[in-house]
Amino acid sequence: MPQDLTPGQLLARGACRCLVEHGFACVTELVPKPGLRVDVMALGRKGEIWVVECKSGRADFTSDHKWRGYLDYADRFFWAVDADFPAEILPADTGLIRADRFGGEIARMAPELRLAPARRKAVTQGFARTAALRLQGRTDPGLPLAPGPAGVTFSP
Amino acid sequence: MPQDLTPGQLLARGACRCLVEHGFACVTELVPKPGLRVDVMALGRKGEIWVVECKSGRADFTSDHKWRGYLDYADRFFWAVDADFPAEILPADTGLIRADRFGGEIARMAPELRLAPARRKAVTQGFARTAALRLQGRTDPGLPLAPGPAGVTFSP
């Protein structure tokens, strides 16, 4: 077990496993614009972009005043919460993934609000560059320009 | 030193370091369509796509009858060869990176043949999904669907 992961990161791991089962590829802790970091961004086989925010408890959700900003970077937006989380406090027009550290399932599909083409292109490129630079950093520790964990910032 | 890398993979490592210095993010051994595997694909900050084929010697180049197929998946195409490689046998209308296991430099810029938008979109998505799935496989060995080293095939 990875003992060093936070409750939110463990939820993210389970949510990512769930998304892979649905044909998505995931990147965690992605920064689509300065000051905005999404827990999970997922890219589907047809280029669809989903964002998942992981909430370890009620306080974690009620203290989040940024989440509506994530809607601008996804075709569908989901929360990932554990079995004990009071789902009734989450907005009805968002998706829901019930997860734990081992996996998860989509409990409620999110409505689709398709990104504009220019935004989709920028987000896909940022996703691609972040994933590739992180992978490079892992396969070649001697890389001259070591990308930080926050990866690449991309906008618009 | 990674003793288990082939001469071509060591050239790829050096070429990738060079490309990172030029602002690109790289994925190695990418399969853009069945039967076609590129040694290095690189994605720039403006979405530009470069492909690099690594040749460890003259025979490695003369036996490659597929390389013109790579031109359909890149804005610019380069060879990566070591200092001893006879560069005069390479086509003049291709780029050249002189590399070794530690790094490299662009010795001749490749001409630009820009991809059509639909192809660029498909290639960028495939690059993104391949990088993300490989990264996921490394960060979460317990992933239910372990992506193989060949990654994702994407076309057109």
Image (spheres, coloured by chain):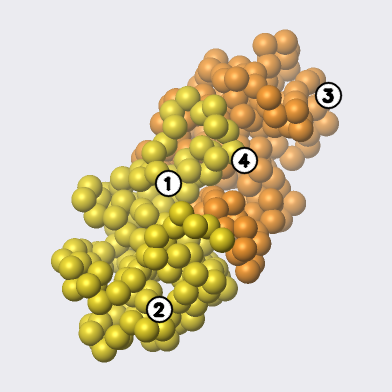
Chain colours: A orange, B yellow
What's the chain of the residue with tag 4?
A
| Same chain assignment for discs 2 and 3 | no
Quadrant in which the N terminus of chain B appears:
bottom right
Residue type highlighted by circle 4? Thr
Q: Which residue is mark 4?
A: A28
Give left or right: position of A48 versus B23: left
Point out the frontmost of discs 2 and 4: 2
The answer to whether the residue labelled 4 contacts the one labelled 1, judged by CB atoms less than 8 Å apart, is: no
- The quadrant where residue B141 appears: top right
Q: In whole angstroms, how far apart are the C-alphas of marks 1 and 2?
A: 28 Å
- The quadrant where residue B9 appears: bottom left
Q: Is residue B14 above or below residue A107?
A: below
Answer whether residue A126 is visible to the viewer in this image. no
**SS label for mark 3:** helix
Residue type highlighted by circle 3? Ala
Q: Which residue is mark 3?
A: A59
Q: Which residue is mark 1?
A: B130
